[in-house]
Image (cartoon, coloured by chain):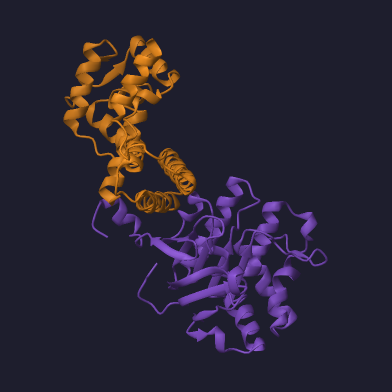
Chain colours: A orange, B purple
Amino acid sequence: MSPSRLRAAYQVCILRAMSIRHGLLALLERGHMYGYQLRAAFEESTGSTWPLNIGQVYTTLARLERDGLVRPLPESEGGQRPYEITDAGRADLALWFATPISRTDRPRDELAIKLALALTTPGVDVRSVVQAQRTATMRTLQELTRLKFASDRPEDLPWRLVLDAMVFQSEAEIRWLDHCETSLVRYRPTPGRPAAGPPVDEAVDRTDQEARR
Amino acid sequence: MSGTAQPVLDVRDVHRTHGAGPAAVRALRGVSLTVAPGELVAVMGPSGSGKSTLLALAGGLDSPTAGEVRVDGECLGVLDRRRLARVRRRRIGYIFQELNLLGSLTAAENVALPLELDGVGVRTARRQALAALAEVELDGLGDRFPDQLSGGQQQRVAIARALVGERRLVLADEPTGALDSRTGEAVLHLLRRRVDAGAAGVLVTHEARHAGWADRVIFLRDGVLVDSTAPLGSVEQLLSGSPR
């Protein structure tokens, strides 16, 4: 993974756990703030690696206001309009913290599907596919570890925890790839069966139909 | 983390076969590896892939059937036993899962032992041993015996013993095996720091998370090097998204 993709992955990781909407609500729970303050606090809380466009801040604030989760306060002498969180906003934030992220909210596991297809597609060296993926994931893990090693200030803790999450995900993927390789050593395709199986969706549909009978 | 300096470890096309005839086991088949000062290389692969054999050859604990191993430019294969033992004592530090600490010696005496065997005076050896113990954050515990230390502290003593003096090559074989994950991470932190200070390191591990501390990871399968990750850029490069 290239560094820019690493950074993108980090952003996705945060996005998965924290939408801008809930990020702003969490910041306003600390006290009222205006747009530029929110942007600075947001960037600080994400290790300055997720630059936020001020336009995104105001668009999100407008939606939060529309939904009754924040309310604008009178303009300051400097012409800045602070916002404060409402009771409904606090309830929404509390609900978000209390609700586990569902596995089904995450994108499909493209890698698992790719390996399943590699196994049933003639002419594909599955061990090479596994090894190429393992090398790439290992490389990502090295990058994450280096970033973690460089972030040892106490205030880096949120960023370190995000890195840890990605380290453990990468580690799990490599363990799964090791497991795939071990299984491949013992794999013997059933004689007479076509090398390429039916498309995954068809197979699932047929299983569903059989289950309904 | 430079790949351009003269390598501390230079393994050239080594083969290692155990036994002979039909029962022969070819543990390594034509593996080459160089490790530069400031570089930590992790070796991964399934059990029986040749990881530990490679480490034993790199450390002069075993000899290749073919090929050669050089440490700081010196070919280990042409040294007699006495000179080979000296290279092992002076230039190479070993960290194993089995700590091999002597229970009748204190922590400082365990660390000083290789220096004293090498003819260093008792006082100098103790001073260097205490400095090595301080490096692994065991200040003040030098006069304790191994059974008076926790598992993590004992592992640190073993690391201090591996790092004492001016060892240029540090070889670690599953060094965190018996430790909890936090203590294990501290061990890797120490290894990383030593390598960043100019040593060359080789880490054999099953754990991808531990291999993540390396600058480069090589993969062995059935005694053959099958793949390797490209060297890493700096933290600044990683964050800025600039090309490596």
> In which quarter of the view is residue B228 placed?
bottom left
Query: Residue placed at 51% from the left, 69% from the top?
Result: B28
Q: Is residue A9 above or below residue B141?
A: above
**Which quadrant: the N terminus of chain B?**
bottom left
Question: For this rendering, which residue is in front, B51 or B92?
Answer: B51
Q: Which residue is most to the right?
A: B104
> In which quarter of the view is residue A89 placed?
top left
Q: Is residue B102 above or below residue A83?
A: below
Query: Residue placed at 57% from the left, 65% from the top?
Result: B52
Query: For this view, does B53 lie left or right of residue A59?
Result: right
Residue B70: percent from the left, percent from the top?
A: 50, 81
Number of callouts in the render? 0
Query: Residue placed at 49% from the left, 46% from the top?
Result: A186
Q: Is residue A162 above or below residue B55?
A: above
Question: For this rendering, which residue is in front, A53 or A40?
Answer: A53
Residue B170: percent from the left, percent from the top?
A: 55, 69
**Which quadrant: the C terminus of chain B?**
bottom left
Question: Is any atom of residue A145 visible in this view?
Answer: yes
Query: Residue placed at 77% from the left, 59% from the top?
Result: B146
Question: Is any atom of residue B163 visible in this view?
Answer: no
Question: For this rendering, which residue is in front, B137 or A149?
Answer: A149
